[in-house]
Image (tube, helix red, strand yellow):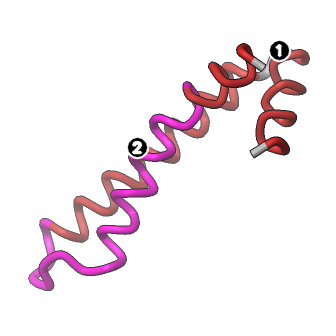
Amino acid sequence: MDEALEVVDVLADSGFEGIVAWLLRLVGLLALLAGLGLWLFTEAGLLVLPAALILVGLVLLVAPSVLLLAAELA
């Protein structure tokens, strides 16, 4: 966790935190939509891959905000 906070701190110092945060949110949204698409538009039901994509998508949507807040507090 310390390494992630250090990377976020370096990005915040260089001014790229907004770009990286929006890039992670975009990847998270794409993963979330891909997981929902696999789950809803196939006849397989809830399998491991769609569930994992949905979970990773939700984490990537929330993680940039949490990391930036933790870097500011540290």
Residue at horizontal 31%, vertical 52%?
A: 33
Mark 1 and mark 2 lie on one chain; the one further toward the N terminus is: 1
Residue at horizontal 46%, vertical 46%?
A: 59
Mark 1, residue position? 15
What x and y, as percent, mark residue 23? 61, 36
What x and y, as percent, mark residue 48? 32, 79
Comparing 26 with 73, the one in front is 73
Disc 1 to disc 2: CB gap under 8 Å: no
Q: Main secondary structure of the magenta part?
A: helix
| Element assignment for label 2 | helix
Can you tell which mark lies on residue 67? none
Comparing 40 with 62, the one in front is 62
Mark 2, residue position? 29
Residue at horizontal 58%, vertical 39%?
A: 24
Amino acid on which the number 1 mark rests in the picture: Gly
Tell me: residue 16, above or below residue 24: above
Amino acid on which the number 2 mark rests in the picture: Leu
Comparing 39 with 66, the one in front is 66
Q: Is residue 45 magenta?
A: yes
Image: magenta residue range: 40-65
Label 2 crowd bin: few (<14), some (14–19), many (20+), radius 10 Å: many
What x and y, as percent, mark residue 47? 25, 80
Residue at horizontal 74%, vertical 23%?
A: 71
* Quadrant, the C terminus: top right
